[in-house]
Image (cartoon, rainbow, N blue to C red):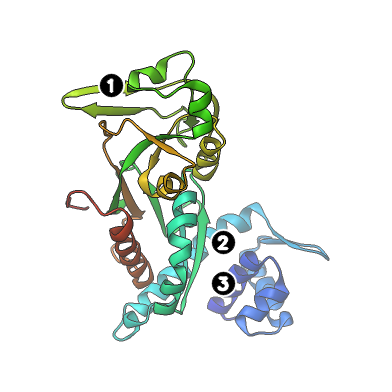
Amino acid sequence: MDRFDALRAFVRVVEAGSFTKAAQTLHMNKTSVTQLVQQLEARLRVKLLNRTTRRVAVTADGAAYYERVARLLADLEDADTSLSGASATPKGRLRVDVPSPLARMILVPALPAFHARYPEIQLDMGVSDRMVDLIGDNVDGVLRGGELTDTSLMARRVGDLQLGVYAAPSYLERAGTPSHPSELEDSHQRIVGFLRARSGKVAGVTMRRDGEHIDVQGRYVVAVDDGNAYLAAGLAGMGILWLPHYMAKAHVASGELVPLFDDWHMDPMPLYVAYLPNRHVSAKLRVLIDWVAELMGEHAPPVTARREP
């Protein structure tokens, strides 16, 4: 048994969910892939996969083994691409997780240009607003807004999201237009709540004007944990929103949202690409980070240059 081939076959079967699909991606026949995985199981004396006539499911031991082997193979590929000449054409599979509104409005529409520039990178993009465990979820990097709380991660600041307060005309017709942020605490005003991923609590904001500042929490009838759903609830007239300008711009232009409190401001939300503190950042991750920074430079450039870890 070629151990490397067996490991690679096992990883592909887990990712593809079948021996047939794995064999196709490896340019091997199904029998050979099956034999390699069986030989690996025999060597380890552990059952890695449960096989039925319809599907292949990874066992608990297999899942734990997959996470370590997949990262080992990725590190080996990165070592290869770091050698002379290879780094000029980054290639391979790259797993990243990004916020859902940013993916829908900015990143995904720009992907054709990224693919044209780096055609050999296979991008697996998780789209969510949840907290991601880079090791447990086998993710190479995450793009997230807000100050980083995990000091074990390395990060590059790629933008600053300017924030504003908005409401749909249907909401303002029903509840009235507030003239001061303190009115958002009144009994007749409502916000759309955004649930923080880590705590599950609704996020508040601090608003400032000429030395005056006020912390706003607000009352809500609906709270969500996804940015696209948050915007949709606001457009439906469920309450007042605080949004990054890039999310609100088109809807303000169309009259679907009305900006509020123009003479007040909120601190911008920093945007980071975070990744594990490995000694070597892979070529494919590096070019992705540079591409995101370039893209956010057009839509939400950093307000001030800060030293990055």
Please name the residue that numbered disc 2 is placed on. 66
Q: Nearer the viewer, mark 1 or mark 2?
A: 1
Q: Nearer the viewer, residue 26 or 43?
A: 26
The residue under label 1 is: 214
Nearer-the-camera pick, 265 or 205? 265
Mark 1, secondary structure of its residue: strand
Q: Position of residue 122 (x, y in %)?
A: 50, 72
Amino acid type, callout 1: Ile
Is disc 3 surrounded by few (<14), some (14 to 19) or many (20+) residues within 10 Å? some
Does any portion of residue 257 appear in the rendered image? yes
What residue type is disc 3 on?
Answer: Leu
Along the polypeptide, which appears first: circle 1 or circle 3? 3
Label for residue 151? none
The residue under the point 21% across, 48% down is 303
Residue 191 pos. (x, y %): 47, 26
Q: Secondary structure at mark 2?
A: helix
Occupied quadrant, residue 118? bottom left
Classed neighbour count for the residue bearing mark 2: other residues with Cα under 10 Å, few (<14), some (14–19), many (≥20):
many
Q: Which residue is mark 3?
A: 7
Residue at the image position 43 percent from the left and 14 percent from the top = 186
Vertical order, 133 against 285 (above or below) = above
Q: Is residue 189 left or right of residue 80?
A: right
Q: Amino acid at mark 2?
A: Tyr
Task: Locate residue 95, reporting x and y percent.
Answer: 47, 62
Q: CA distance from mark 1 to mark 2?
A: 50 Å
From what the image shows, is residue 39 above or below residue 206? below
Q: Is 243 located above or below residue 136 in the figure?
A: above
